[in-house]
Amino acid sequence: MPHRIWISNPQGIFTATDADATAGIVVEDGVIAEVLGAGHTPSAPVDETLDASGHVVIPGMVNTHHHFYQTLTRAWRPVVSTPLFPWLKNLYPVWARLTPRDLELATTAAMAELLLSGCTTAADHHYLFPAGLENAIDTQVEVVRRLGMRATLTRGSMSLGEDEGGLPPQSTVQDPEVILADSVRLIEQYHERGPGARVQIALAPCSPFSVTRETMRDSALLAEKHDVRLHTHLAETIDEEDFCREMFGMRTVEYLDSVGWLTDRTWLGHGIHFDDEEIARLGAAGTAVAHCPSSNMRLASGICRAVELEDAGAPVGLGVDGSASNDHSNMIWEARQALLIQRLRYPAEQVTPERVLGWATRGSAAALGRTDIGRLEVGAQADLAMYRLDELRFSGSHDPISALLLCGASQADRVMVAGDWRVLDGAIADLDLAELIASHTAAAKRLLADA
């Protein structure tokens, strides 16, 4: 028999649509069956009623850009105050020593932190496959399934090493044939399609300064053939812009177009240094951008022109980015950061809490090519996060939706994925958090012991 849950009369609710959900929502068999306006009750009997009068409810947030493995190198002193290129040059040799167990712990830590913050779907950009870590994505799939979340796991790649004028050391690059063959294997083995998909695979050559033009072009052709999405870093720093001009003789968006990536199949990490013409081209193509405010501030990379990109037609989502350039994996904090940094570029009335929460939910879902998550509407997946506003930081606040960002919510009280409670009373179901922290900390110390 169907199991029906009425999440009733929330203190506040953000549906990411224009629907009135004052009286709450009804979840049935993992999807949203009813959205109830003021004064309404469920149209049929329910098996469970959850009084949400002490909670603010939002769609489960969608993280569009991360590097899970980097949770092992947070706040490492040699790179605390360096820009992107020297930051990478110092960290590449450390990351080249990752083991499968390291990656399992790093992925679990990143996804657990995201889940506790109210994130239900995450995209990870994994592009490091040194000897012994060839099955990195397989390891990540196991963690996603164990935590009961959703993920777009990208088969990243680096094929342009120092010997050919790229940035990464040769020990971290792979032959193009290996990259493409493994990409096909992962798509065929793990990629799920249609509403409710838990694991999806995308192809993600790392960046213009670490991947050859041929790898970019071949990845685009492979993604089109298998109908999966494309992801890469682009226009994150001025150094990257200069690299593209010197290496390819063109700016980043022109280069993107030249290798067949300027499409609505693509979403880009960071997307900071675009000019007006490039924004118009990205918007016309429907190419999405993952705005990563904390990382952009941490590395002093610049401010994404998020409002102009969205107004031009480019879907805008949010990403926490890697935990060595953020250095946390907290989506509700990331939404607050986006609100504040975007108000340095645009008038306050253009950057409202609702617009930013829209980036974190439906905008991020659109960046991943999904319409079944990121909103609370009939037929959508029952992915949601619930926050309490009874801490001191919220005392005296009035508008509950605005309070989430302006007063600094940091952790969800309850999180549901596909109708299943994955967080209850601020704790993740079936996860020994203390043991995870101890094991993850030990792995991080070992990794950096000889650095």
Image (cartoon, rainbow, N blue to C red):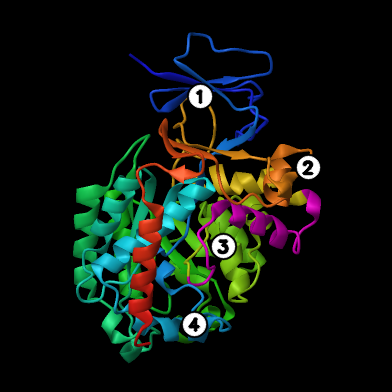
Label 1 sits on what residue type?
Val
- Tell us which disc is closer to us: 1 or 2: 2
| Mark 3: secondary structure | loop
Give the residue number, with chain letter if any, for mark 4.
87
x, y percentage for residue 328?
52, 63
- Tell us which disc is closer to us: 4 or 2: 2
Q: Check the image and report above or below for 263 versus 177.
A: above
- Which corner quadrant of the image does residue 182 belong to? bottom left
Question: Crowding near pointer 3: few (<14 within 10 Å), some, many (20+)?
Answer: many
Mark 4 → mark 2, Cα distance in angstroms: 40 Å
- Which corner quadrant of the image does residue 8 belong to? top right
Question: Crowding near pointer 1: few (<14 within 10 Å), some, many (20+)?
Answer: some
Say whether disc 3 or disc 4 marks the residue closer to the N-terminus: 4
Say whether disc 2 or disc 3 marks the residue closer to the N-terminus: 3
| Mark 1: secondary structure | loop
Tell me, yes or no, whether the highlighted magenta stretch contains residue 8.
no
- Which corner quadrant of the image does residue 402 belong to? top right
- Tell us which disc is closer to us: 1 or 4: 4
Give the residue number, with chain letter if any, for mark 3.
292
Q: What is the number of the mark on residue 397?
A: 2
Answer whether residue 433 is visible to the viewer in this image.
yes
Tell me: 79 left or right of 110. right
Say whether disc 1 or disc 2 marks the residue closer to the N-terminus: 1
Q: Check the image and report above or below for 51 versus 301.
A: above
Tell me, yes or no, whether the highlighted magenta stretch contains residue 345.
yes
Mark 1 → mark 4, Cα distance in angstroms: 45 Å
Give the residue number, with chain letter if any, for mark 1.
378
x, y percentage for residue 428?
42, 45
Q: Quadrant of the N terminus?
A: top left
Label 2 sits on what residue type?
Ser
Q: Which residues are magenta?
A: 324-349
Q: Check the image and report above or below for 302 versus 115.
A: below
